[in-house]
Amino acid sequence: MTDSAASAWPPIARFIAAERRLSARAVRAGPVAAGFYEFLRFGAKQGWACLFGGALLALLVATHLFYPRESWLPRYDFLLVACIGIQAALLALRMETLDEARVILVFHVVGTAMEVFKTAVGSWSYPEFSYLRIGGVPLFTGFMYAAVGSYVARAWRLFDFRFTRHPPAWAVLVLGAAIYVNFFTHHYTWDARWVLFAAAGVMFGRCRIWFRPWRRYRWMPLLVGFGLVALFIWFAENLGTFAGVWLYPHQRGGWSMVPPAKFGAWFLLMLLSYALVFALHEGRGAVRAPPPRAKMAFPSARASATVR
């Protein structure tokens, strides 16, 4: 029997035995019940992977609705204190691993550097006052980028990501570096995003990501996975601008949706995020091919007796 991914987080590890009993009942109930149970497991794992990001998004909306504007502590500074508190609580309660915290730190630094530049050139702005800021950037904003990195790192562990036809590590890292540089240079020189899209298509076009919601590995094209995550980031971005946390130039006269064209920028950011997390896993030899029987598991192989 394979160890459950939940064993990495003590608060949920205690439920492993109970979950195995519940999953055995689902198997005995027949294929429809088992399929529904697998769908629920997939959703639960996604929710756990989004723990940090979901808490942050809830904070953005809640402070927009309820935070007193006359408070001595500006809203942005409160968000920074709250983010640090969430981070500390997740570590203290062992709901986050040290590896995930390191990923968040790296993303915080990378994201803050980009924010300082982007606000300086007018790509977007933070309209409210704060004490704790660098230039026009409140310090809590790095956590918004960190939420993406946290999701990728947690999902990687929860779903035991495996890959077929994955590009070499050096190519992934070069693409990630080129994307990051282009976020800066396209303001002054030719915008290379279409070249970067094409490079990503060539590199990842044949790559499959295998993931394990329950007993067997499922797969999808990795580019589809990138696109789905970028789409949900775009949804979150609309909530963030609706909450007035930051504004694009076209929103200064009143809120309107973030243009769908921004999806491309988030797709590139997703590729950059993947490259950073990939570097962590590749350094530990964790980027693996699926087990020999995984190809038989989609779509028609019989389920194994192992429950995860």
Image: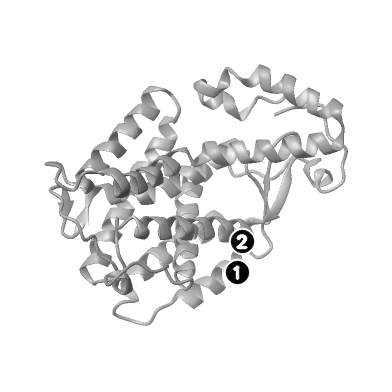
123, above or below 13, in the image? below
Residue 178: x %, y % from top left: 42, 67
Quadrant holding the C terminus: top right
- Label ID, residue 201: 1
Closest to the observer, 287 or 267? 267
Report which quarter residue 92 is drawn in: top left
Asked whether residue 86 is in view, the answer is yes
Q: Do tag 1 and tag 2 residues touch (Cβ < 8 Å)?
A: yes
Q: Amino acid at mark 1?
A: Gly
Q: Which mark is residue 289?
A: none
> From mark 1 to mark 2, how far is it between C-alphas?
8 Å
User: Mark 2 — residue?
Assistant: 223
Above-or-below relation of 223 to 56: below
Hey, which quadrant is residue 23 in on the image?
A: top right
> Given the image, on which type of amino acid does mark 2 rest?
Leu
Give the SS element for disc 1. helix
Is 73 displayed left or right of 174 in the figure?
A: left
- Residue 212 location, x and y as percent? 69, 39
Residue 174 visible here: no
* Side of 61 where 274 appears, left or right: right
Residue 48, percent across and down?
53, 36
